[in-house]
Image (cartoon, rainbow, N blue to C red):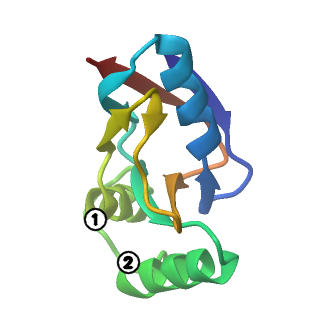
Amino acid sequence: MKLTIKTEYKTQLIDITEEVKEAVVKSGCKKGLVNIFVPHSTCSIFVFENQDPNVGRDLLKKLHDTVPSQEKYAHVGGNAEGHLKSAYLGTNVTLPVENALVVIGQWQGIFLGEFDGPRERDVIISTVG
């Protein structure tokens, strides 16, 4: 299954947990694995705390501090910052599925991290089992 997510800002975090859960139900997978993958090199997919939005702001700030936009980079595309942030967080996660439910912690969500937006981003959701 493919989701298309429209981002609104240069950098942002978008909780896609409910969309992933719905995709797993639609897939018919009862027990197995779900892989969530983004085929872009300036955004990420990762599991992160989803209860307090301040934690997301903290993550974006720390990423900005680590990979500042005003830094001089060798990459000529003008978006080296986005590539580096994506590399830090990764482009996919695999989670267990039990009884057609994605197994994830109480305080966790599945996030798309945008680092070169705004854009439309594809998210590929695959199940096995």
Which element type, helix, strand or loop, lies under badge 1?
Answer: helix
State which quarter of the image contains the C terminus. Answer: top left
Q: Which residue is mark 1?
A: 88
Q: Residue at x 42, y 25 (%)?
A: 125
Question: In front: 66, or 112?
Answer: 112
Q: Which residue is mark 2?
A: 67
Q: Residues within 10 Å of mark 2 (few under 14, many from 20)?
A: some
| Tag nearer the camera, 1 or 2 | 1
Question: In front: 53, or 69?
Answer: 53
Q: Position of residue 11 (x, y in %)?
A: 59, 62
The reply to whether residue 53 is visible in this rendering is yes
Q: Residue at x 31, y 45 (%)?
A: 93
Q: Residue at x 53, y 68 (%)?
A: 107
Tell me: 17 left or right of 42. Answer: right
Dot placed on the residue nearer the N-terminal end, 1 or 2: 2
Tell me: 8 left or right of 117. Answer: right
Q: Position of residue 40 (x, y in %)?
A: 39, 37
Q: Quadrant of residue 102?
A: top left
Q: Is residue 104 above or below residue 128?
A: below
Question: What residue type is disc 1 on?
Answer: Tyr
Is label 1 in contact with label 2 (beta carbons under 8 Å)?
A: yes
